Image (cartoon, grey):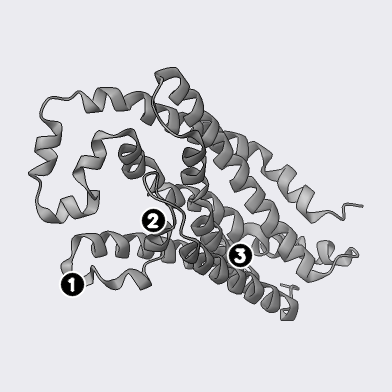
């Protein structure tokens, strides 16, 4: 009898984890290998300096793009939670609603496993999958940095990459909550997907609109960006906010699933 929901879920995800991990590793390597060619484009930085202020605010300090750290920030680290959220939201939405929709929930709960364990172990398995994928990305970055002999602090490179996980876990927790509350996978996916897209859109508008520039407190992606940078240090407060929101959503999911009837 299969009683480890965590191991079962992780085993079911291993194929997707491998594909996603290799894809992210390739993406990271391509960005590092492409950077020398980017930096040598004649007049590129002057062109970027002359962009409209709205676009320049979105890119940040244009001079940072002349360094590998700044280039990776814009091309990889800032949008990384958005990429990982595609995986996290998809799997989080299927975690419970998938069992109900596929008529396997009653069989699952007939085993000597409490409902809160089902929710928590499935969530932890998805989190583990995102960690594995992230470290595959780290390996791709490290190998490409060694190949190009780029001057980059490896420890800070790892920290900047791992910094994408807290926001990813928050979006995954939202999808999990939707999965615990809804009977259909698509409903949970729409709930979390809408929040992800709206959050990224809001951050984009905040960076390009003077009227919204001070609304950092309401931007999830702003918390992600302010928690760490390759040229700066760690700030645990933004990470703490994201993890606290994640814990609240997971707890809400457990409570909702404890009370619902799965006989659909």
The CA span between labels 3 and 1 is 34 Å
Please say whether residue 38 is visible from this viewpoint.
yes
Marked residue nearer the N-terminal end (3 or 1): 3
- Looking at the rendered structure, the secondary structure element under dot 3 is helix
Determine the residue positioned at 7% across, 44% down.
50
Q: Are marks 2 and 3 in contact (CB under 8 Å)?
A: no
Q: Quadrant of the C terminus?
A: bottom right
Give x and y (percent) for residue 136.
Answer: 57, 34
Marked residue nearer the N-terminal end (1 or 2): 1
Mark identifier at residue 69:
none
- The residue to which callout 1 is attached is 211
Determine the residue positioned at 69% across, 78% down.
255
Q: Residue 122's image quarter? A: bottom right
- Looking at the rendered structure, the secondary structure element under dot 1 is helix
Count neighbours of disc 3 (C-alpha within 10 A) and say few if under 14, some if 14 to 19, many if 20 or more.
Answer: many
Mark identifier at residue 225:
2
Q: Are marks 3 and 1 in contact (CB under 8 Å)?
A: no
Say if 60 sits above or below 238 in the image: above
Closest to the observer: 30 or 177? 30
Closest to the observer: 246 or 19? 246
- Looking at the rendered structure, the secondary structure element under dot 2 is helix
Give x and y (percent) for residue 44.
Answer: 14, 32
Of badges 2 and 3, nearer the viewer stands 2
Determine the residue positioned at 70% across, 65% down.
100
Marked residue nearer the N-terminal end (2 or 3): 3
Give x and y (percent) for residue 102.
Answer: 70, 59
- The residue to which callout 3 is attached is 176
The CA span between labels 2 and 3 is 24 Å
Q: Which residue lies most toward the bottom here?
A: 259
Q: Residue 262's image quarter? A: bottom right
Determine the residue positioned at 29% across, 34% down.
67
């Amino acid at each position: 009898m299969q009683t480890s929901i965590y191991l079962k879920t992780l085993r079911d995800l291993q194929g997707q984890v491998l594909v996603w991990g290799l894809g992210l590793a390739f993406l990271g390597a391509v960005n590092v290998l492409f950077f020398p060619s980017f930096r040598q484009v004649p007049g590129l930085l002057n062109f970027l300096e002359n962009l409209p202020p709205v676009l320049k605010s979105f890119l940040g300090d244009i001079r940072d793009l002349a360094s590998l750290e700044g280039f990776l920030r814009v091309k990889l680290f800032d949008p990384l939670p958005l990429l990982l959220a595609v995986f996290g939201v998809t799997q989080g939405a299927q975690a419970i609603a998938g069992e109900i929709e596929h008529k396997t929930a009653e069989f699952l709960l007939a085993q000597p496993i409490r409902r809160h364990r089902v929710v928590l172990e499935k969530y932890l398995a998805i989190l583990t999958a995102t960690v594995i994928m992230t470290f595959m990305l780290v390996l791709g970055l490290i190998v490409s940095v060694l190949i190009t002999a780029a001057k980059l602090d490896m420890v800070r490179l790892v920290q900047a990459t791992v910094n994408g996980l807290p926001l990813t876990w928050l979006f995954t927790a939202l999808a999990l909550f939707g999965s615990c509350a809804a009977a259909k996978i698509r409903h949970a996916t729409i709930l979390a997907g809408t929040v992800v897209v709206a959050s990224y859109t809001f951050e984009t508008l905040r960076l390009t609109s003077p009227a919204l520039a001070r609304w950092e407190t309401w931007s999830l992606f702003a918390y992600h960006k302010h928690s760490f940078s390759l040229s700066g240090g760690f700030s645990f407060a933004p990470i703490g906010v994201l993890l606290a929101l994640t814990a609240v959503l997971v707890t809400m999911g457990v409570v909702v699933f404890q009370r619902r009837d799965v006989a659909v």
